[in-house]
Amino acid sequence: MSPRGRGAAAGGRGLDRARELLMRSLDGELTDADRRELDALLAADPDLRAERDRLARLREVAMGMRLRNPPEETWDGYWNGVYARLERGVGWILVSLGAILAGGWAVWTGVRGLLADPSLPGFVKAGILALGLGLVILLVSVARHRLFVFRTDPYKDIER
Amino acid sequence: MPEAALVARAAGGDARAYGELVRRHMRRAYFASLGLTGSHDDALDLSQEAFARGLRSIRSLDPARPFYPWLYGILRRLCLNHLRNGRTRRAKLAAAGGWLEEEARARAEAGDPARAAERAEARRRLAAAIDVLSPAQREVFVLREFEDLSYAGIAALLGIPEGTVMSRLYAARRRLAAALEERP
């Protein structure tokens, strides 16, 4: 790619040609033609030379550092850690499913008992029925909406 | 076994094949996470979580595509969300710098104690300054300086233009260079 073309590619968020060459120089991504161009720019601009020196010092310090290695046993138990998470995920799904089924059955049994009670006034029974029906409608509506959003949201992979 | 075959087998429910993928990429994922979060515990936790989520959605990965960039997409979302948690960030700042160490070559070169102390101070300042970079700048800086990726490699991994990589890196370097020059 020509220097002009590369400059345009790099300039999307404001790096001018001199800074682009400076960066490529620091990172060893400079062609011979680029180097000659940068040398000419440096010779003509003391501020650019000062900036080059500051960034070169930073690069020197950074190159003398590395990410700290974890204890060796970290790698021995790594897959087990991943596997445990998968197991726990399955466990949570089963616990949630069981809670929904058992809770639903308990609620239904309780409501059925109340509705069958002849001493309970009719309007209370109607209220209980309306309450139960309303909760079911709300639950289904929220679940359906969340499923729809999950399937169609174009931003679902964007970080919060 | 080729990676594409492992991905296909893992998608078919073969846990051993996925285990092999984890073993091949766990170090890279861990260090990528360490560079972003600055904490061993968080790096281990988040990279393992990324692999676990990866297995749950591996059927969405085309076996012809490389595994790691796909996994990195999951990992970076986890790490960036984690970084936005204020409490996590404060705890991390308290332990600034512990995630970096001097290269063996640099240690050998720093013969005299005065030079070693100077280098240690520069390292401490740099690590503290990296910790307050924006996540986007930090990510690009870490990938370039500690994972030694080229501009093109970073752009491909993050799915952004090379020019954006350079401008983020430039902004990060300017801030870090200023931090190195500050008087204690």
Image: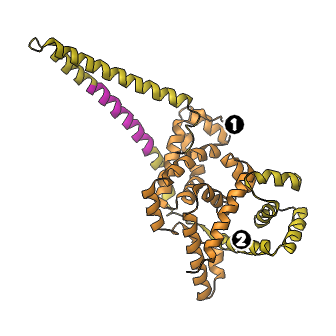
Chain colours: A yellow, B orange
Same chain, marks 2 and 1? Answer: no
What residue do we see at 62% from left, 34% from top?
B8
Q: Give the CA separation, mark 2 to mark 1.
A: 40 Å
Give the residue at mark 1: B64
Majority secondary structure of magenta residues: helix
Q: Nearer the viewer, mark 2 or mark 1?
A: 2
Q: Which residues are magenta?
A: A84-103
Quick check: B121 left or right of A5? left
Is residue B136 positioned above or below A37 on the image?
above
What residue type is disc 1 on?
Answer: Ala
Q: Which chain's residue wears label 2?
A: A
Asked if one can make out residue A77 in the rendered structure from this viewpoint, the answer is: no
- Tell me if label 2 and label 1 are in contact, CB under 8 Å: no
Q: Quadrant of residue B151?
A: bottom right
What residue do we see at 54% from left, 28% from top?
A151
Which image quarter is the C terminus of chain B in?
bottom right
What residue type is disc 2 on?
Answer: Leu
Q: Quadrant of residue A30?
A: bottom right
Quick check: B121 left or right of A53? left
Q: Quadrant of residue B123?
A: bottom right
Give the residue at mark 2: A55
Q: Nearer the viewer, residue B12 or B37?
A: B37
How far across and how far down the image is residue A71, in percent? Answer: 49, 64
Q: Which chain's residue wears label 1?
A: B
